[in-house]
């Protein structure tokens, strides 16, 4: 078992370096557009503050190449002040004498927010010099940055190898949810897959093949599967080189008695005109951008019978309101199903939020790439380096 902050003794007075994922969207005024990621880390911060840590909080924000005033973490420090009045300080450096001085002045239970880790070269490369600097400023390391847990970087991998460490409540919750869903699923277990491309999602489908009772495939990825079944896909997005892999998945599912449902109708575009089409009408100029009404009904009926649902990938090009309906109706069906529901992936979570049903989904896994790795059944590198107890 990996150590969580609950199992850390002797936090009081210690310099605790906490890696968070505060990669939040900011507008040109520096106003935070969506603070979900900060709010999600508050329980861990609160716990460490109450235990009397000298808490040093670090994160990345965006993809800066060196210093970029539009990607400063100062607005995040200001946001934290609302939850921890008079306890939050900000230092405009990542390490060096200014940081050392700020830490020396930090009292037990106070928070020092460091500047964007990616302003200094070496974070993403997990450079030994960067790791050494981070090690100098802390006695204990805590990781709660789920969003980058699938990457090996200095502040979530390098430093964890060198310091006594633990994971925060956010990462712990994500691991627990997927562990339970895969090791002990409630049946019928319905897995829903969609999204733009099948390329990075085949492993995910393979992983649920042994567990799910029903697999619903929509979105752009459906066309690779339809092609595998010999259905004409027109100019719809299709990974021709993966048609054979898709065929293998369909055959394996059949052997195991798993029901795989592919779209039977589509909302497609042809020279700017949007039409509902049945197969095999999709050919030539037609591009399929959403599942059609018949498919949606078929999917809804499986979803309403489910006891557990896992969903990754919008079922259409939902950013365009002409192609949003399939995703929206499926999101509402998932919310109304009464099944234990997990939605993972950046776009999938946005789609569920836009459909207005986010509060009726049991677990929204916001980690993007990290959620996908968990759905593939993989161990995340940043979790692997946390001490076992
Ligand atoms: P997630 O971020 O949840 O893992 P993806 O990034 O894989 O999901 O997929 C989301 C993207 O897939 C969206 O940008 C959406 O427009 C696109 N998409 C879904 N269906 C189609 C389609 N039929 N054709 C083209 N793009 C699609
Ligand atoms: Mg995406």
Image (cartoon, rainbow, N blue to C red):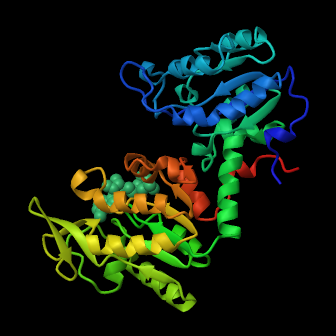
Residue 186 placement: quadrant: bottom right
Residue at the far bottom in the pictured view: 255
Residue at the far right in the pictured view: 10
Residue at 76% across / 48% down in the picture?
A: 385
Work out whether residue 186 or residue 135 is closer to the camera in this orientation and state it.
186
Apparent side of residue 204 relative to residue 177 in the rendered image (left or right):
left
Apparent side of residue 290 relative to residue 141 in the rendered image (left or right):
left
* Depicted 282 relative to depicted 57: above or below: below
Apparent side of residue 205 relative to residue 226 in the rendered image (left or right):
right
Q: Position of residue 135 (x, y in %)?
A: 76, 29
* Depicted 95 relative to depicted 303: above or below: above
Residue at 56% across / 64% down in the picture?
A: 339
Work out whether residue 170 or residue 97 is closer to the camera in this orientation and state it.
170
Residue at 60% across / 31% down in the picture?
A: 59
Q: Is residue 202 visible?
A: no
Work out whether residue 252 or residue 331 is closer to the camera in this orientation and state it.
331
Work out whether residue 384 or residue 185 is closer to the camera in this orientation and state it.
185
Q: Position of residue 386 (x, y in %)?
A: 78, 46
Quarter of the image with the N terminus in it: bottom right
Q: Position of residue 115 (x, y in %)?
A: 58, 21
* Depicted 73 relative to depicted 315: above or below: above
Q: Is residue 66 visible?
A: yes
Q: Position of residue 97 (x, y in %)?
A: 69, 11
Residue 96 placement: quadrant: top right
Residue at 57% across / 32% down in the picture?
A: 38
* Depicted 227 relative to depicted 342: above or below: below
């Amino acid at each position: 078992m990996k150590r969580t902050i609950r199992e850390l003794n002797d936090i009081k007075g210690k310099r605790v370096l906490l890696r968070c994922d505060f990669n939040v969207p900011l507008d040109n005024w520096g106003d935070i557009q969506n603070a979900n990621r900060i709010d999600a880390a508050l329980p861990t911060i609160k716990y460490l503050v109450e235990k009397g840590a000298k808490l040093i909080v670090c994160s990345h924000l965006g993809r800066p190449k060196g210093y970029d005033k539009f990607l400063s973490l100062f607005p995040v420090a200001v946001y934290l002040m609302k939850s921890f009045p008079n306890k939050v300080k900000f230092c405009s450096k990542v390490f060096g004498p200014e940081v050392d001085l700020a830490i020396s002045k930090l009292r037990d239970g106070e928070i020092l927010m460091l500047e964007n880790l990616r302003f200094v070269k070496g974070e993403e490369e997990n450079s030994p010099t960067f790791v050494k600097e981070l090690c100098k400023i802390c006695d204990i390391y805590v990781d709660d940055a789920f969003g980058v847990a699938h990457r090996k970087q200095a502040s979530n991998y390098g430093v964890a190898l060198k310091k006594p460490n633990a994971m925060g409540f956010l990462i712990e919750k994500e691991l627990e949810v997927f562990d339970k869903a895969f090791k002990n699923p409630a049946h019928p277990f319905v897995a829903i897959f969609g999204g733009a491309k099948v390329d990075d999602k085949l492993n995910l489908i393979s992983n649920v093949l042994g567990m799910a009772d029903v697999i619903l495939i929509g979105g752009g990825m459906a066309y690779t599967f339809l092609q595998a079944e010999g259905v004409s896909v027109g100019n719809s997005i299709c990974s021709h080189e993966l048609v054979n892999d898709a065929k293998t998945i369909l055959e394996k599912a059949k052997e195991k008695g798993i029901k795989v449902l592919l779209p039977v109708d589509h909302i497609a575009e042809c020279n700017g005109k949007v039409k509902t089409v049945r197969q095999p009408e999709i050919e030539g100029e037609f591009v399929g951008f959403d599942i059609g009404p018949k498919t949606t009904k078929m999917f809804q009926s499986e979803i309403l019978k489910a006891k557990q649902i896992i969903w990754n990938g919008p079922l259409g090009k939902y950013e365009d309101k002409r192609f949003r309906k399939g995703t929206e109706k499926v999101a509402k069906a998932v919310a109304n199903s009464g099944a234990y529901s997990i939605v993972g992936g950046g776009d999938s979570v946005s789609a569920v939020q836009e459909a207005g049903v986010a509060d009726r989904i049991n677990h929204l896994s916001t980690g993007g790439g990290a959620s996908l790795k968990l759905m593939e059944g993989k161990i995340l590198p940043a979790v692997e380096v946390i001490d076992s107890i």
